[in-house]
Image (tube, rainbow, N blue to C red):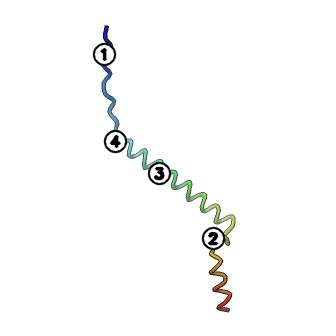
């Protein structure tokens, strides 16, 4: 006896696109949280040293 051929599985494009955007936004949020946490932990590392040198020379 032959098995009936399975029906093709239809992918919901809207659901897939929504899921992909949601995952992208979650990854973006995690990256931003990590960056903000680094700035909060050490705010002076985010400022280039050339700014301090130029400011010192202007005084």
Q: For residue 32, which numbered disc appears in the image?
A: none
Kindly report which numbered mark, 1 or 3, lies closer to the viewer in this rendering: 1
Q: Position of residue 21 (x, y in %)?
A: 43, 49
C-alpha distance separating marks 2 and 3: 26 Å
User: Who's the residue at 34% across and 43% down the image?
Assistant: 14
C-alpha distance separating marks 2 and 4: 42 Å
The kind of secondary structure element at disc 2 is helix
Q: Residues within 10 Å of mark 4 (few under 14, many from 20)?
A: few
Tag 3 or tag 1, which sits nearer the N-term?
Answer: 1
Question: Residue tagged by mark 1?
Answer: 4
The kind of secondary structure element at disc 4 is helix
Quadrant of res 32:
bottom right
User: Who's the residue at 62% across and 81% down the image?
Assistant: 51
Tag 2 or tag 1, which sits nearer the N-term?
Answer: 1
C-alpha distance separating marks 1 and 4: 27 Å
Q: Residues within 10 Å of mark 3 (few under 14, many from 20)?
A: few
Q: Could you tell whether 52 is left or right of 30 in the image? A: right
Q: Is residue 56 above or below residue 6?
A: below
Question: Residue tagged by mark 3?
Answer: 24
Question: Residue tagged by mark 2?
Answer: 46
């Amino acid at each position: 006896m032959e098995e009936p051929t399975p029906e093709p599985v239809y992918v919901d494009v809207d659901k897939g696109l929504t899921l992909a955007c949601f995952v992208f936004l979650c990854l973006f949020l995690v990256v931003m949280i990590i960056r903000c946490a680094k700035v909060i932990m050490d705010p002076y590392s985010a400022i280039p040293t050339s700014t301090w040198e130029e400011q010192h020379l202007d005084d």
